[in-house]
Image (spheres, grey):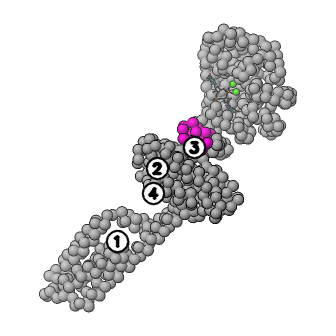
Amino acid sequence: MTHYPSRLENVLMRIDLIPKWLKLLIVFVTIPCVYVLVFLTGGIKYSYSHTMYLAIVFAGLSMGAGWGGIVGIIAGIVLGPIMPLSTPFDPSFSGYEYQNIIQWVYRAFIFFLAGSITGLFCDILKRKIVTVTDMLSHNYETKIPNIYSLADHTNHDFVNNKTIVISLLINNFDAIIEMLGHDVYYRLLNKLYLSLVVNMGKNCTIIQASNDKFWITKAYTNYKDDINHIRSVLKQPLSIANIPIFADYAIGIDLIEKQSDCQAIDSYRHADIAAKDAQKRNAPYLIYDDSLSEKKLGIELLSTFLRALEENQTFLVYQPIIDLKTMKTVALEALIRWVHPLHGMIMPDRFIPLIEGTNLINHLTDWVLKTAIDKVLELQKHGYDIPISINISPKNLSDPDFFSRIRSIINASKIEHRMIELEVTESAIIANLEDNQHWMKTMMDDGFTMSLDDFGKGYTSLAYLSQFDVKIIKLDQYFMRHILSDPGVKIIVRSAIDLSHQLGCKVVAEGIEDEIITTICQELGCDFGQGYHFAWPMKAADLDNWLNLNVDQKK
Ligand code: C2E
Ligand code: CA
Ligand code: CA
């Protein structure tokens, strides 16, 4: 609820900013000027005398009813006994003739009324503005300044070199309201506010930022003293209606060394993050540091992810998987990207671990699957029969409906099951080996291709390989990075390839970055390769071009 001033209020506020001496100067320069104007235009009988209202109205508007009236009378006198009816500049001038007293006294009276009424009207309006601003900048229930009052404080508070910004959370506010009602709680807040004001001393701004939160801003020399002051206030029970109530609290702090360090609004946010963390950790206070901000970013990403899916902030890139014999593209791996409106491009390593902690991972995988299906269909229209593999998160596997859901999505699309390959990591399978083995076998029997992703990363045990019902083994990038420098790695890779072949699986070497590694993989009998050496993950728009040059033949 913000009060937006009307145009008139805006004008008044601007006029109010002019210093009083300048207002008086404007008025008392205008009056003689109008006198000269009236004289030069032939005297008071012509209508130029009305110009005087400018000075009178300005005096009333800018200095109130008192000055409006005084200036009205002075103006009336200036255009009164000393201003002739006709001057030598009047074509019908036949000598100086002065106004009779009733004439100019009446005019002076009207001037007086004009000045005082304008001033009175203006005083009422200003008082109204003050009242409305005051109401809006204070919390209705507690009468404590609220965040709308910040505009008055923020700038000068932060001019100081060292400023402490404190977010004070009342942890047990729900319990107090439940037990004693809102009324008692608001009185408690008010009492707490007054005690803080008294204890924190001058140059301290305290506002009630929400129902359970105060923001305190202060210049500091030793911030620990300030925290101790707050804690000593909170240590005392606050007595409302003879009931002693303790406020359980958490304090978050942002320390600003130089004004340029931080925008005011960021500091309040930082202090809030620190306070929330203190609340979680049961700590009496915490000072903000950047690692807390990372958490906040995580929360922000989680809360905006569903919208990101709906608003096409996410998209898929596709990395070709190459047949190491023909050097042609045999499949594509779909990898998700997120272009966040504020944070720009966010890579999956950054947001997928967060998403995996929530049910959102099911939305993500469903979206990836549907987008990949559309791509398969589009490529088929262009004459390319290229399967696309998608990554399945370990968390997807713990959803009992997962496999039946993806099966029905693929069935609804009418594409062949072999066109969508599912990449699952060994650690994900091992987490619930029996159930996953059952599902993987069912999917394989149904014509789906299952790949074992990042093989060797977690368990490095070839013994496990026979336990997984998969068609493709993807050797983790680790092996390609170390195959040249570590002879042991080459032996493992050779054994993994041989064993996979004996089990009837094909092998993809991930992370191939140059020609030497390509040759080694070919020598070791590896079937497929994937890596920057062949192609970086590319946008959908670039795929056609790539496939045109790199598939064996069109359908
Ligand atoms: P991943 O499944 O192992 O995917 C391969 C990652 O290696 C991709 O990173 C790819 O860009 C990168 N890469 C490809 N070739 C090379 C290379 O030659 N050298 C190096 N150093 N890296 C290479 P990206 O796209 O950042 O994805 C990282 C991981 O995020 C993926 O690893 C996968 O686990 C996960 N991810 C990506 N997209 C999705 C998705 O749609 N769903 C799920 N659940 N996970 C995804
Ligand atoms: Ca993968
Ligand atoms: Ca991988």
Q: Position of residue 218 (x, y in %)?
A: 46, 49
Q: Residue at x 44, y 51 (%)?
A: 157
Where, by quadrant of the figure, is residue 325 drawn? Answer: top right
| Distance between mark 2 and mark 3 Cα atoms | 17 Å
| Distance between mark 4 and mark 2 Cα atoms | 14 Å
Q: Earlier in the sequence, mark 4 or mark 2?
A: 4
* Residue holding disc 4: 152
Q: Amino acid at mark 2?
A: Lys
| Distance between mark 1 and mark 2 Cα atoms | 35 Å
* Residue holding disc 1: 63
Q: Position of residue 526 (x, y in %)?
A: 72, 14
Q: Amino acid at mark 4?
A: Asp
* Residue holding disc 2: 218
Q: Which-is-in-front pick, marks 4 and 2? A: 2
Q: Position of residue 450 (x, y in %)?
A: 78, 26
Mark 4 residue CB less than 8 A from any atom of ligand 1: no
Closer to the camera in the image, 246 or 160: 246
Q: Earlier in the sequence, mark 2 or mark 3?
A: 2
Q: Earlier in the sequence, mark 4 or mark 1?
A: 1
| Distance between mark 4 and mark 3 Cα atoms | 27 Å
| Distance between mark 1 and mark 3 Cα atoms | 50 Å
Q: Which-is-in-front pick, marks 1 and 3? A: 3
